[in-house]
Image (tube, grey):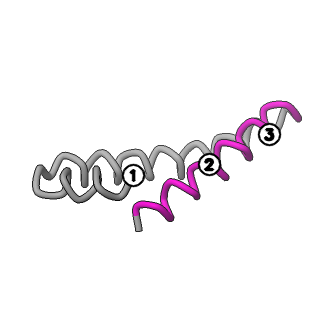
Amino acid sequence: MIQWVLEENDQLICCIVECQNKGQANECTQYQHVLHRNFIYLATITDNSDLIPSLLKST
């Protein structure tokens, strides 16, 4: 699941950059909201100290 979120974040960042370059602020904001949600999810699971060792092994 973590890898999937990281890959989605990569795609979202590319879409955000593309929208910014095209001046599409509304679409850019939508992608930023999803990216923010993903960051909150990742931060929440890494706050759980029981998960940190397993996360470090998978990188």
Expressed as whole percent of the image width and height from the top left, the position of residue 13 reads 65, 42
For the N terminus, which image quadrant?
bottom left
Q: Alpha-carbon distance for marks 3 and 1?
A: 30 Å
Q: Which residues, given as a range, are shown in magenta?
A: 2-22
Amino acid type of the residue tagged 2 in the rendering: Asp
Q: In the rendered view, does 39 fall on the left or right side of 32?
A: left
Question: Type of residue at label 1?
Answer: Thr
State which mark lies toward you, 2 or 3: 2
Q: Secondary structure at mark 1?
A: loop
Residue 7, quarter of picture: bottom right
Residue 28: image x %, image y %? 70, 41
Q: Which residue is mark 1?
A: 59
Label 3 crowd bin: few (<14), some (14–19), many (20+), radius 10 Å: some
For image coordinates 53% across by 47% down, the residue present is 35
In three-dimensional space, the C-alpha distance between marks 2 and 1, rounded to whole angstroms, equals 16 Å
Precedes in sequence: disc 2 or disc 3: 2
The residue that appears at 44% across and 51% down in the rendered structure is 37
Disc 1 residue crowd, few under 14, some 14–19, many 20+, Cα 10 Å: few
| 21 in magenta | yes
Tag 3 secondary structure: helix
Task: Give the mark, 3 or 1, whose residue is nearer the N terminus.
Answer: 3
Q: Is residue 24 left or right of residue 58?
A: right
Report the amino acid beneath label 3.
Cys
Residue 2's mark? Answer: none
Q: Give yes or no for residue 44 being in the magenta stretch.
A: no
Q: Which residue is mark 3?
A: 19
Q: Position of residue 36 (x, y in %)?
A: 47, 44
In the picture of the structure, the residue carrying the numbered disc 2 is 10
